[in-house]
Image (tube, rainbow, N blue to C red):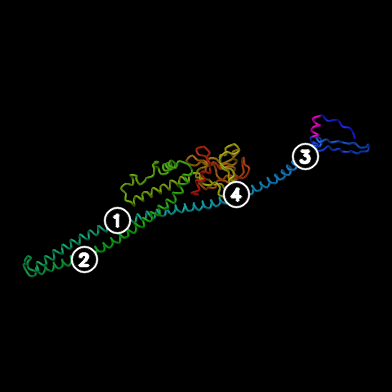
Amino acid sequence: MTGKPEPSGAIFRINRSLSRFVPEQTIIIRNRAGESELVLSPLQRMAMFASAALMIGWLVVATSATVSGFLDSDSAEAQYDILQSAYETRLAELAAERDSFALDAQETQAKFELALEQIAVQQDELIAAMTVQNEQQITMFALQRKLNRAITERNAAQENLDDLQAEFAAIAEGTGPRESSETELINTLTRLNLALSETVEQRDVAMMEIASLEEQIDLTQQQIRLDAQRRDRMISQVEDAVQLSLGPLENSLNRTGLDVDSLLATIRRNYSGAGGANFTTLDSPSLEGLDPVDRRLQLLMQKLDEVQLYTIAVSKLPIAMPVRSAFRFTSPFGMRDGRPHNGMDMAGPVGTPIYATADGYVTFAGWQSGYGNLIIIQHEFGFTTRYAHLSAIQVEKGERVSRGDRIGDMGNTGRSTGSHLHYEVHLNGTPVNPSQYIKAGQDVY
C-alpha cells in the first residue's frame, strides 16, 4: 500500500466522527505499470456525495425549467386562443345587440312618426268638431229666437181670439152695441166669424211651429251633448298622443346634459318670434275665467307647442348615428396611448355609407393631415361634427345638409390602421363625448 500523508488534527477528528456513518474506502487502480491504491476518507466521500447530489439537483431543476417552459409556452398559446375566441364571441354578441337595438330604434322612430301623424289628424278633427259645435250653438240660438217669436205670435193670436170670442158672445146675447139694421148685424157676425177662423188658424199654425221648434231644439241639444262627448274623447286621444311623443323627446334632451330650458327658449325666440318665457300652467293668468273644456284645449295647444319645440331641438342636435350598417366600436372617446382621443372610432368595410347626424351646413370637405379625407359640419347651438378617414366625400363646402343625408363613405385615409370612421362632436369649440349624444338619440332614432 502506498503511504498517505497524515491529516491535521481537525480533519482527523472530522473523519473519525464521519467514519461511523461513512467508512473509509480504498479504490485499487490497475494499469500496465502495476496497481495503485486511492484511499477516500469519510470527509472526501461526503464531499463527493454532496457534489453528486448538487449535480443531480441542478439537472432536475434545469430539466423542470425546460419542461415548464415548454408547458408554459403551450399554455400561453392555448390561453391566447381562448381569449381570442372569447373576444370574437363577445364582438359577435355586441354586433347582434347593436343590430337588435337598431331594429328597436327603427320601430321607435316609426311609432314616433305615427304618433305625430295621429296628432296632426286628430288636431284637424278636433278643430272641425269645435267648428261644428260653434255652428250648432249658432243654430241653437237662432232656433231659440224663432221659438220666442212664435210664442209671442201665439200669445197675440190667443188674445185676439179671446177678444173676438167675447165680442161674439156679447153680440149673440144682445148685450153688445145695437146695429142700425139686421143686415149690418149679419155683416158684423160674418166678419167676426171670419176673423175668428183666421185667428184660430194662426194659433194652430203657431202651435205646430212651436212644437216643431221644440223638437228641433231637443234634437240639437242631444247632438250637442253627443258632440261634446266625442270632443272630450278626441281631446283625450290627442292628449295621450302628445304625451307619447313628448316623453321620448324630453328624455332625449335631458340625456344630453344640456340646459333644456335655455335651449327651448332659444328655439322659441328664433322660430316663433316670442320671448323665452316658461310654458303656461294651470295657475297662469291667461287661463283664468275659462271653462274646463277651454282650459283643456288651451293646455293641449301649449303641449303641442312643446312637442314642436322639442322636435326642432332634436332635429338640430347631433344625436343620430353616423353609421347605420354593421360596424364595431374600436376606440372610445378619452385618453389613448397617453394622448387625448377626441372622438370615437367605428370600424367597417371600405365604402360603408356615412350620414350627417343633424341639420347643418358643410364648413370643410377635403384632405387634412392626420384626418385624411375629412368633413366638418356646423350645426346650431354651437355644435360641429367631424367625419374623418373617409374613402369618398359626397358633399361640398357651403352645402346645407339634413339629418340622415349621406355625406361620404368609410375609408382608411390619413393616419389610420384600418378602415373605420373617426367621429367627433365639438360644443363651442371643445371636443365632447359623442356617445353621450348618440345615447340621447336612442329614444327617438
Q: Residue at horizontal 7%, vertical 65%?
A: 177
Tell me the CA gap for discs 2 and 4.
93 Å
Decide if residue 347 is on the left or right side of residue 238: right
Secondary structure under badge 3? helix
Tell me the CA gap for discs 2 and 3.
144 Å
Q: Amino acid at mark 1?
A: Ile
Camera-side residue of 389 and 330: 330
The quarter of the picture where the N terminus appears is top right
Q: Amino acid at mark 2?
A: Asp
Q: From the image, tell me which residue sits under label 3.
A: 53
Q: From the image, tell me which residue sits under label 1.
A: 138
Q: From the image, tell me which residue sits under label 2.
A: 204
Q: Residue 212, how many percent across, how many down?
A: 26, 63
In this rendering, the label closer to the viewer, 2 or 3: 3
Q: Residue 106, how many percent across, how many down?
A: 51, 52
Specify which label sits upstream in the sequence, 1 or 3: 3
Secondary structure under badge 2? helix
Tell me the CA gap for discs 1 and 2.
28 Å
Neighbor class of circle 3 (other Cα within 10 Å; few <14, some 14-19, many 20+) is few
Q: Amino acid at mark 4?
A: Arg
Kindly report the secondary structure that dominates the magenta region of the rendered protein: helix
Secondary structure under badge 4? helix
Q: Residue 294, how many percent across, how many down?
A: 34, 51
Specify which label sits upstream in the sequence, 2 or 3: 3
Q: Amino acid at mark 3?
A: Ala
Q: Which residues are magenta?
A: 9-16
Q: From the image, tell me which residue sits under label 4.
A: 90
